[in-house]
Image (spheres, rainbow, N blue to C red):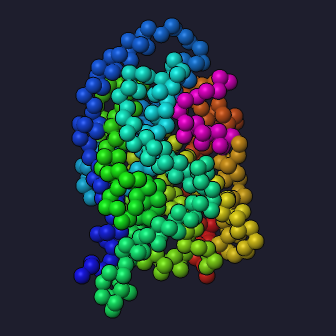
Amino acid sequence: MSRIGSRARADVGLRDFRAGGGRAECAAFCPASTAEALASVTRRVLEMPHDPAAAELRGLAARSMIAEDARWGMDVVLSGQEVGAISGYLPLLLGHHWVRIAYEGARALRSHDWYVGVPALADMLQDRYAAITARGRHAAKLLDDTKKGYDQVLIELDRLLEDHHAELTGKTFRWLRGLETDLGIYYCGDMVAGATLPVAYRLGLEVADGGMIAGQAARAVSEEWGATLAVLGAAALDPSEPAATIDFRHACAIGYRDHLASRYFRGRFEAGFGNGLRALLLLIEGDLNTARALLPHTAFGHEQPVFRARTITLYHALTALQRIAERHGSLDTPGLRALRAMLRDSPTRRLLSREGKFVRNRCMHYEITDPTIQLDASRPMFGLVEAVYPGHTWEEFYADVATVTCRLADCLDSWHPSKGAAC
């Protein structure tokens, strides 16, 4: 008889990714040839013609941000292992950030720009699963995914819901089927932090394929991502080993509960929304709660990587919610009225402005190709926020990110068909 519920199987296809992403073996984080590569890079840098101009500083800024982000990712994994219980959840809730860092960082290290690219390190990068990495990076952009339109994203989420339901239900005695579940939800305290279906969507996991990502073993793919982070961690020519410095003992308690998707979604968002759209909103809600409740616990010593992760998360959440509000422009409900009001308020408009998008771009893409950007090495992110958003500081922008993240997460949490939302 099949097991009732899906606690052991709702994350089918996630087990190997979780195990691979949670490992800190030397092979993943400490390539044996790193020291030799660094020596080669150092010689190359010393042979560069001295150039005190902005191009040199832009290259240093790009490589520093790559190394910072990669070392943050490695620290999260290593520190999570020291706590134990939380370690299995971290790759599931934060893995899409590591995929972004791996994809964007590898691109930058392969740059033809003399001050950005590092051939000795680029040669160490593995790219057997480059297509999977690229897909994961695009999926993390939600409705800004240039490879898919709005409707295609919802179609894929609907298909995943159907696949999960078919695989995880209907396999026990009929009189017990009312207890079956097909959706696992992760909680950070009492807040939704993620769900099995959104994780599967982002990673390309199929529930019935036994832990494969696009036909490849999840463990092998995640180990390649780990090895990439190890190489990227040396982009600023720092040969030190990655270390566990984050104290997760006081982080929000991460838990897991099973649900039946059709039953769970009946009480979420709008009655007229399809389950694919509701799954997308659940994904956004989880991202926002993770950004406000979990990411701050990883920020000590990693303030700038966490700033970039939170900025990217919020920007794509806002643009997706803006698209959803526009698509349902004729629908007048308390929930949508509250969402539209929030999208119109001043902090949100600043984040969605042309300059706000520039900040997002500088958080997402490492190489700085615009020669007009004037940097300041004494400021966070080398003064990139002040350079692309004149009149605003890094601290002011971060305050807007924190405020809007909390308000938007509360808005989604309280959005129910009969109650609307309290944004």
Q: Is residue 85 above or below residue 120?
A: below
- How many numbered marks have been drawn onto this rendered protein structure? 0
Examine the image and state in which quarter residue 6 appears. bottom left
On screen, 76 above or below 65? below
Residue 316, image x and y in percent?
59, 52
Q: Which residue is at a point 55% across and 46% down the rendered structure image?
A: 311
Q: Position of residue 219 (x, y in %)?
A: 30, 50
Of 24 and 261, nearer the camera is 261
Residue 80 shows up from this direction? no
> Would you say residue 408 sits in the magenta stretch?
no
Residue at 65%, 31% (x, y): give it.
387
Quarter of the figure with residue 118: top left
Q: Which residue is nearer to you in this view: 271 or 407?
A: 271
Describe residue 56's horizontal placement relative to residue 3 as left or right.
Answer: right
Taking the image as shown, residue 237 lies to the left or right of residue 375, namely: left
Span of residues in magenta: 355-372
| Rendered view: 125 above or below 141 | above
Image quadrant holding the N terminus, namely: bottom left
Q: Residue at left 43%, top 70%?
A: 163
Residue 383, image x, y percentages: 58, 30
Residue lying farthest bottom?
175
Which residue, as the protein is rendered here, is positioned at the far right?
330
Judge from the rendering whether residue 289 lies leftward or rightward of residue 257; answer left or right: right
The x and y percentages for residue 100 are: 47, 43
Q: Classify residue 191 by image quadrant.
A: bottom left
Q: Is residue 201 visible?
A: yes
The answer to whether residue 359 is magenta is yes
- The residue shown at (33%, 92%) is 175
Locate the C terminus by quadrant: bottom right
